[in-house]
């Protein structure tokens, strides 16, 4: 019988395979002396290698004993160390190992491996919050003893991310606020911080001229169709050109004009080549992934007798953080490509090209599966008779027939 964890694994595999296909299709070059898309590039190229590593990372994540992290206190838990490591990586983007691309310093390169520091912070902050908010001494419903320290940590991490990656910072901030509410924070306490958050949002936009330009372009992309409005216009052309069934895999035309066709705007290429049907299937896959994850988080059964298991606040908040991060990221990416919000550099999870993003996302989905696996083992242990139980059963009770006494 399929369980929600099986659904998470199967949908993750499906999205990764689809991502490999679409990255190769969107990256197709016409007129090159040597074809850049071949059987070797599809089955042995970098996207397939990253997908295989992502599958291995998901398998590794399913074996993590999450309940041990819940019991760990202070610096014996990996949560504070992971948060400190993420903050250090965010600071290192301005060091010599940092790489500037497209006027942004977001990447680090260590040992020939290039990755975005914000990707680690995007996943470690929910992990830390899930651990921190479930400490016995933390009372998140009280402003001083729980809410204020959490807000300071969230502000520090999102602020460092927002310096170079405003879209990811907004995503991380939204997920963190929902986790605070899930941990028991009072809504009116958070609403009192809304003016401060609004001011930070406005300052973050006007601090960089290109963010103001993107906002104005969103309001009227046709004001500069050959410049700042180019991506939005080409994205809308790709979506409208696909129709219902699409032009066919690899037959898209707008990918030759979109510079971010394999990353931020890959959903536009999906719409053009596979049409509304393909886009609907992708959206359905993400919705199914979210529903399977929520089914794991909301499951309260312990055994066949219908009893509830322990509240497990840590694993529930962690699972909620993972599901929210993937769901909101996919939602924001689709909004960007359909010109419903200003353009931001937010990738489509498990589909847009990116080795670090695929591997970390798959690993965190493996943690969601690990929640269900841990409960399954607990249920199996609770239903198995212990030796003391078997010895205490009388022969009459087990067989229904009297047994003669044994003589020594």
Image (cartoon, rainbow, N blue to C red):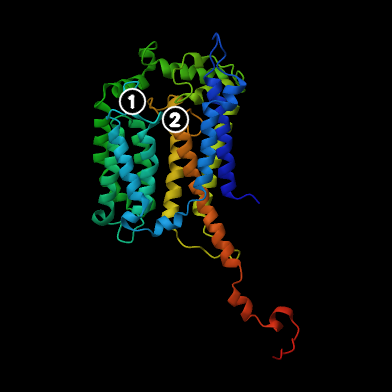
Q: Nearer the viewer, residue 120 or 328?
A: 120
Is 198 in front, or is 77? Answer: 77
Mark 2 or mark 1, which is nearer to you?
1
Residue beneath label 2, please? 347
Spot occupied by residue 20 in the image (x, y as percentages of width and height): 55, 28
Q: Residue drawn at (39%, 27%), measured in percent from left and top?
A: 345
Q: Is 225 in front, or is 144?
A: 144
Locate the C terminus by quadrant.
Answer: bottom right
Q: Secondary structure at mark 2?
A: loop
**Residue hosting label 1:** 99
The answer to whether 251 appears left or right of 334 in the picture is right
Q: Quadrant of residue 76?
A: bottom left
Q: CA distance from mark 2 to mark 1?
A: 19 Å
Position of 52 relative to 266 (above/below): below
Q: Give neighbour class at mark 1: few <14, some 14-19, many 20+ (Cα, 10 Å).
A: some
- Label disc, if present, on residue 304 of the rendered structure: none
Question: Residue 121 placed where, x, y %?
Answer: 36, 39
Location of residue 137 with respect to 331 vertically, above or below: below
Q: Residue at x 39, y 10 (%)?
A: 226
Say which of 261 and 391 sits in front.
391
């Amino acid at each position: 019988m399929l369980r929600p964890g099986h659904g998470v694994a199967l949908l993750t595999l499906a999205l990764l395979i689809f991502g490999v296909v679409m990255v190769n299709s969107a990256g197709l070059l016409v007129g090159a002396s040597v074809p850049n898309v071949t059987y070797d590039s599809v089955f042995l190229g970098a996207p397939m290698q990253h997908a295989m590593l992502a599958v291995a990372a998901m398998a590794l994540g399913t074996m993590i004993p999450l309940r041990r992290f819940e019991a760990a206190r202070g610096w014996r838990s990996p949560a504070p160390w992971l948060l400190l490591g993420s903050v250090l990586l965010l600071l290192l983007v301005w060091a010599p190992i940092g790489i500037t691309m497209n006027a942004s310093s977001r990447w680090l390169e260590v040992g020939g491996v290039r990755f975005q520091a914000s990707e680690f912070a995007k996943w470690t902050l929910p992990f830390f919050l899930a651990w921190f908010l479930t400490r016995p001494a933390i009372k998140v419903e009280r402003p001083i003893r729980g809410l204020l320290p959490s807000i300071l940590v969230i502000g520090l991490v999102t602020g460092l991310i927002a310096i170079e990656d405003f879209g990811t910072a907004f995503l991380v901030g939204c997920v963190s606020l929902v986790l605070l509410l899930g941990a028991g924070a009072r809504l009116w306490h958070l609403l009192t911080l809304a003016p401060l958050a609004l001011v930070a949002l406005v300052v973050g936009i006007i601090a960089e001229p290109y963010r103001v330009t993107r906002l104005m372009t969103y309001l009227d992309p046709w004001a500069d169709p050959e410049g700042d409005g180019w991506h939005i216009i080409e994205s809308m052309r790709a979506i409208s050109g696909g129709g219902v069934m699409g032009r066919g895999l690899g037959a898209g035309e707008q990918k030759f004009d979109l510079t971010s066709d394999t990353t931020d705007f890959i959903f536009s290429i999906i719409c053009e080549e596979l049409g509304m049907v393909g886009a609907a299937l992708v959206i359905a896959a993400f919705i199914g992934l979210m529903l399977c994850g929520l089914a794991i988080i909301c499951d309260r059964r312990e055994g066949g007798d219908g009893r509830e298991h322990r509240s497990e606040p840590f694993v529930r908040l962690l699972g909620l953080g993972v599901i929210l991060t993937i769901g909101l990221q996919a939602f924001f990416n689709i909004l960007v490509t359909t010109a419903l919000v200003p353009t931001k550099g937010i990738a489509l999870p498990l589909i847009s090209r990116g080795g670090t993003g695929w591997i970390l996302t798959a690993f965190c989905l493996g943690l969601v599966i690990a929640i269900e696996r841990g409960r399954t083992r607990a249920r199996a242990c609770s239903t198995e008779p212990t030796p003391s139980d078997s010895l205490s059963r009388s022969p009459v009770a087990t067989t229904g027939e009297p047994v003669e006494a044994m003589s020594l």
